[in-house]
Image (tube, grey):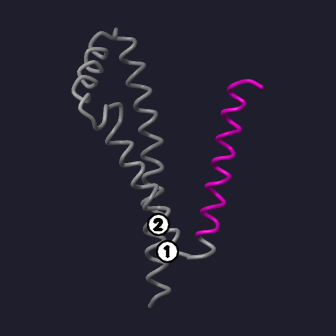
Amino acid sequence: MHGRTIAVAVAVCGWLVAGLIAFVLVASFGFFAIGLIGLLSWFICVRIELENDAAVGSGWTHHLIGSQHEAREGMSGDERMRWRHEQSVGLQSVRFFRNLGMALTLIGTGGFLWLQL
């Protein structure tokens, strides 16, 4: 098997497990679980946006940030343009899932409150 096939198989298995967990939560807790799943995905997307291409959290952080800055300054114009394109494509997908998380949170919260009243 090729490495890519194995990676895709692992990703599919991961999504299957996540889908089953989401199904069990929604079947057990209803709208509250939908809101919780939305809140979790919203939180993860915000963290990804905040930590986008940055070193996070240790005593070595200032050295890592400095080396990243030097590497970006050493890029040619074409390399910098490709790097910015990669960043923009990644952020577009993160924004989509962040908005989906917001929608799920609103739907879950609204449905939960509607059923409680």
Q: Is residue 92 above or below residue 44?
A: above
Callout 1 crowding tier (Cα within 10 Å): few <14, some 14–19, many ≥20: many
In the image, farthest residue toward the right: 1
x and y, in percent, of residue 44 in the image: 42, 50
**Direction from residue 3 to residue 112 in the image, left or right:** left
Q: Secondary structure at mark 1?
A: helix
Q: Find residue 6 and report its image quarter.
A: top right
Q: Find residue 17 and report its image quarter.
A: bottom right
Residue 32 numbered mark, or none? 1
Which residues make up the magenta segment? 1-25
Residue 68 numbered mark, or none? none
Q: Is residue 110 above or below residue 103?
A: below
Q: Amino acid at mark 1?
A: Phe
**Direction from residue 6 to residue 25 in the image, left or right:** left
x and y, in percent, of residue 63 in the image: 24, 22
x and y, in percent, of residue 8 in the image: 68, 35
Q: Amino acid at mark 2?
A: Leu
- Taking depth in this image into account, of 19 and 84 the one nearest to the observer is 19
- Taking depth in this image into account, of 100 and 22 the one nearest to the observer is 22
Q: Which residue is mark 2?
A: 36
Q: Secondary structure at mark 2?
A: helix
Q: Residue at x 40, y 30 (%)?
A: 87
Q: Residue at x 40, y 32 (%)?
A: 88
Could you tell me what secondary structure mostly forms the magenta stretch?
Answer: helix
Q: Is residue 44 magenta?
A: no
Q: Is residue 4 magenta?
A: yes
Q: CA distance from mark 1 to mark 2?
A: 6 Å
- The answer to the question of whether label 1 and label 2 lie on touching residues, with beta carbons closer than 8 A, is yes
Q: Is residue 13 above or below residue 99?
A: above
Q: Is residue 67 above or below residue 6?
A: above
Q: Residue at x 39, y 42 (%)?
A: 48
